[in-house]
Amino acid sequence: MDDLIQVAMLGVLKAIDRFDPERGVMFTTFGVPTIVGELRRHFRDRTWTLHVPRGAKELYQMIGGVVDELHQTLGRSPTVPEIAERAGLTVEETLQAFEVGDAYRGVPLAPPNDDEDTPDAITLGTTDRGFNSVEAKLTVRTLLEALPTERERMIVKLRFVDGLTQSEIGKRMGVSQVQISRLLRASLEKMRRRLNQA
């Protein structure tokens, strides 16, 4: 409302500057149309979501009038070729004029919505599937580095990263499955203590 009052006051100032009392017309007769013109110009230029050239705006408004007229005349929604013919435009120009309307109305943006009944809501983004695992990977890396020997780190990696069984790790490392089990238990306990200290 403050903006509209300011625009109207600007209209009053323009009317004062242009008013010629020698023409024998009252100030209100000249001033009111000037103020209304300023308000209309404000709505025409400032209420569009995107900047659109004046000619495109006027074409969009003209097409709207043609659509209303044809709707009443035909008793149904007119086709694009009918609108183009009545407006004296090509079909492509008519379609472009309709597209200009999207800049006036804009497209509603909404946060991601679980409600499937609102298909017009645009999803602004999705959660990266790997995002939650980043912190876990960094924590595991830090805990692995806390193990004192390369052998311990290798056993934990082979078991939990590569997915090998304790028997397969034992064959690779040249020790028994029971020894791998003990080493894993001890390594995991060291990692758990380190995690609790953090």
Image (cartoon, rainbow, N blue to C red):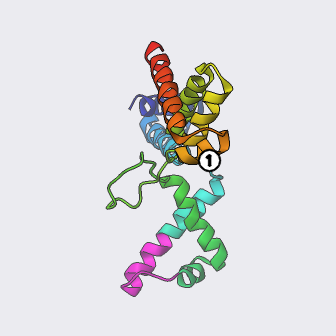
Q: What residue sits 51% from the left and 32% below the top?
A: 184
> What residue do we see at 39% from left, 61% from top?
119
User: 15 and 60: which one is in front?
Assistant: 60
Q: Is residue 40 above or below residue 184?
A: below
> Along the horizontal axis of the image, is 2 left or right of 158?
left
Q: What's the magenta bit mostly, secondary-structure-wise?
A: helix
Q: Find residue 1 and report its image quarter.
A: top left
Magenta-highlighted residues: 65-79
- Image quadrant in which you'd find residue 70: bottom left
Q: Is 66 in the magenta?
A: yes
Compared across the picture, whether 96 is left or right of 1 comes to: right
Going by the numbered disc 1, the residue's amino acid type is His
Q: Please say if 184 is above or below 166.
A: above
Measured as percent of width and height from the top left, residue 191 is found at 50, 23
Q: Can you name the residue that lies furthest to the bottom here?
A: 74
The image shows residue 182 at horizontal and vertical percentages of: 49, 31
- In the rendered image of this protein, does residue 165 appear above or below residue 156? below
The answer to whether residue 138 of the structure is visible from this angle is: yes
